[in-house]
Amino acid sequence: MWGILVGDGIWLRLLERHHAEPLFALTDRNREHLRPWLPWVDDVREVGDSLAFIEKGLERFARGAGYELGIWLEENLIGVIGVHSIDRANASTSIGYWLDAGHQGRGIMTRAVATVLDDLFFVRGLHRVEIRVAPENHRSRAIPERLGFRMEGILREAGRYGGRWGDLMVYAILDREWEARRHYTSCL
Ligand SMILES: CC(C)(COP(=O)(O)OP(=O)(O)OC[C@H]1O[C@@H](n2cnc3c(N)ncnc32)[C@H](O)[C@@H]1OP(=O)(O)O)[C@@H](O)C(=O)NCCC(=O)NCCS
């Protein structure tokens, strides 16, 4: 199957239709963990909802407008990382991600984001990548901070999470900044 080895048995693979069941099971197990930060959790009620998400990602991939990758530890799906919508005119996009609660704290997502940045900057030639995060989401904020993103500002009540409107911090990194970082950091 198509995939990129991130290291230590971690693979990124395009989410395909036959992954709908494991994706739904993973989402269902992690509702309490994800609900405070992600607006769509309660909209995923059955396998068909996970399938619809995968199909939208495949359609975006086919148009060269983004993608949704599963994060696998060997044969087990443990998370998702997605490129939301590539703006070709401005060569920019944003990334979103989530990980199974039991697999946090090992650097898996930091390395997954680094791998996706390599693809976006070095393969797809983008100029700018954003990550938007709730100010209270310290675990998620640590990822762009660890990878050298700059915090550019706060969008007031731009996100719906935890059942309310909340602010979103905008982190961004440019192609030359990522290239310089990759040059001086042999591994992450
Ligand atoms: C956000 C989320 C993906 C972060 O997961 P995480 O496990 O903290 O992130 P990482 O996989 O990068 O792991 C980082 C941890 O691994 C450690 N680590 C170990 N090896 C590492 C390595 N090679 N590189 C980086 N970190 C490493 C870090 O020190 C850090 O540990 P700490 O939490 O004790 O400081 C996860 O908490 C999550 O899914 N949250 C709910 C959904 C969500 O908020 N999504 C984002 C919305 S914006």
Image (cartoon, rainbow, N blue to C red):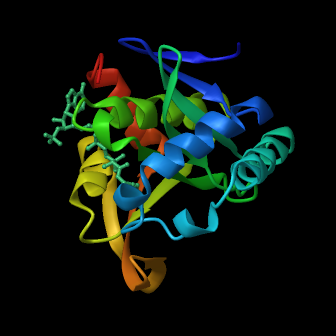
In the figure, residue 108 lies in which quadrant? Answer: top left
- The quadrant of the image that shows the C terminus is top left
Residue at 63% across / 68% down in the picture? Answer: 43
Q: Where is residue 177 in the image (x, y as percent from the top left)?
A: 38, 42
Q: In this view, does 108 lie to the left or right of 94?
A: left
Indicate the quadrant of ligand 1 in the picture. Answer: top left
Q: Where is residue 36 in the image (x, y as percent from the top left)?
A: 36, 69
**Relative depth, front residue between 16 and 27:** 27
How many numbered marks have been drawn onto this rendered protein structure?
0
Check the image and report above or below for 20 versus 98: above
Q: In this view, does 151 lie to the left or right of 98?
A: left
Q: In this view, does 175 lie to the left or right of 19?
A: left
Residue at 29% across / 16% down in the picture? Answer: 186
Check the image and report above or below for 122 versus 99: above
The answer to whether one can see residue 72 in this image is yes
Residue at 78% across / 40% down in the picture? Answer: 61
Q: Position of residue 4 (x, y in %)?
A: 57, 17
Check the image and report above or below for 4 versus 99: above
Q: Position of residue 90 (x, y in %)?
A: 68, 59
The answer to whether one can see residue 97 in this image is no
**Relative depth, front residue between 97 and 47:** 47
- The quadrant of the image that shows the N terminus is top right
Residue at 44% across / 47% down in the picture? Answer: 29
**Relative depth, front residue between 160 and 77:** 77
In the figure, residue 168 lies in which quadrant? Answer: bottom left
